Image (cartoon, rainbow, N blue to C red):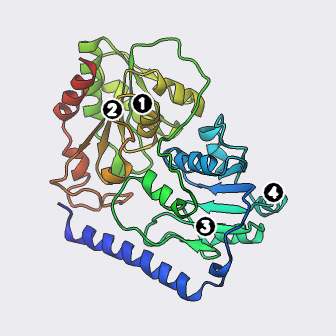
Amino acid sequence: MKRLRFILDDKIRNSALWIDYILYLLLNPFKFKQFPKEVRRILVVELLEIGDLIVATPVIRTLKENYPNSEIDVLVLPSMTDVISGNKNISEIISYDNNLISKLKQKDYDLGIILHPGSFKISLALFNGKVKYRIGCVKAGTFYGKGFFLNKKIRPNTKIQHKVEDNLDVIRSIVKTIIKKPEIFTDKLVKNKNYVVIHPGAKFITHNWISERFAEVADYIANKYKKTIVFTGSKKDDALIKNIQGLMKNKSINSVGTTIKQFFAIIKNADLVLSVDTGAMHVAATFNKPVIALFGAGIPDVWYPYTEKRTVIFKDDVCVSCLKAKCTNKINMECMKAITVSDVIKEADEFLR
């Protein structure tokens, strides 16, 4: 059960959404513009990272299904272009940079879809870039920007639901057919099979599990199922992975340094993926690979791997779902410490036996 202060955090966050929406209804002069009669060019904006982009792909698929003759471009961070490259529903992937406004003016977009974050700066850029009709944006934190220069702001839905549904809420009023399945692509090959992927690192320290426990689980899988253990992660995870490898009795592979497409291929060909709450579990889910996801500070009902082949390990009898990047408990990392080696081994057995 959540502690009182986290319940209050939720109420404050939801109140901020409603206050922002009411101010939009009362003060925003752009809401009177009519939806365009013809939609030829669409821009979808998602300026977060791998997992966020993956769960945004159903929006792209849905828009293409409903506007088949339109060109759909996607605005992403420069480091994230490979996450959605190869997607046939996308005409062009645009990198966010200082020349954004001039890029937008050249394209002459009829429709702009802002997912999140829907900051004042981004909504202003679309306005200055002459995007004719601008819609936004998904649920955001208390202090996240929620966009101002919008012709249509989505009525807040404070119901707990998967982020795929949150994203689709942004466009439900302008489409008839909804497609919920995420998609990503890779043309990279993996020579050696018969391995299990472990992804131990996340952006927030509150999502990390204990290295000694990762090592114990990895050795168990290697010994019982004769699987090679392949660790995945970004360069910032290299020290963490090497530490886990140093605690193991079996040899393992550290794949840090691969490209995004190679990372996708490694997960696509794995027999099982064990991941903390981060992008790797969404990659596994999109390729319909068996995945064990370890949750602490995040919200499983919102961010669980979007596949039937999933197990979420989440201890809801301790301090959980605080959404904090840094643990503030007196007993540090209580939520992740509550997940035991036997919890993970039990689920690994279910998938691998």
Q: Are marks 1 and 2 in contact (CB under 8 Å)?
A: yes
Query: Callout 3: 10 Å neighbours few (<14), some, many (20+)?
Result: many
Q: CA distance from mark 1 to mark 3?
A: 31 Å
Decide which of tag 4 and tag 1 comes sooner along the chain.
4
- The secondary structure type at the circle numbered 1 is loop
Residue wearing tag 3: 135
User: Residue at (50%, 69%) from the top-left corner?
Assistant: 144
Q: Is residue 113 visible?
A: yes
Looking at the rendered structure, the kind of residue marked 3 is Ile
Residue wearing tag 4: 107
281 left or right of 315? right
Q: Are marks 4 and 1 in contact (CB under 8 Å)?
A: no
Decide which of tag 4 and tag 3 comes sooner along the chain.
4
Q: Is residue 216 above or below residue 98?
A: above
133 left or right of 178? right
Query: Callout 2: 10 Å neighbours few (<14), some, many (20+)?
Result: some
User: Which quadrant of the view contains residue 294?
Assistant: top left
Which quadrant of the figure contains the N terminus? bottom left
Q: Which mark is residue 288?
A: 1
161 left or right of 54? left
Decide which of tag 2 and tag 3 comes sooner along the chain.
3
Q: CA distance from mark 4 to mark 2?
A: 41 Å
Q: Is residue 32 above or below residue 84?
A: below
Q: CA distance from mark 2 to mark 3?
A: 34 Å
Q: Is residue 259 visible?
A: no
Residue closer to the observer: 32 or 311? 32
Horizontal and vertical percent position of residue 284:
43, 33
Horizontal and vertical percent position of residue 70:
72, 50
User: Residue at (38%, 72%) from the top-left corner?
Assistant: 13
Looking at the rendered structure, the kind of residue marked 1 is Asn
- The secondary structure type at the circle numbered 3 is strand
Residue wearing tag 2: 309
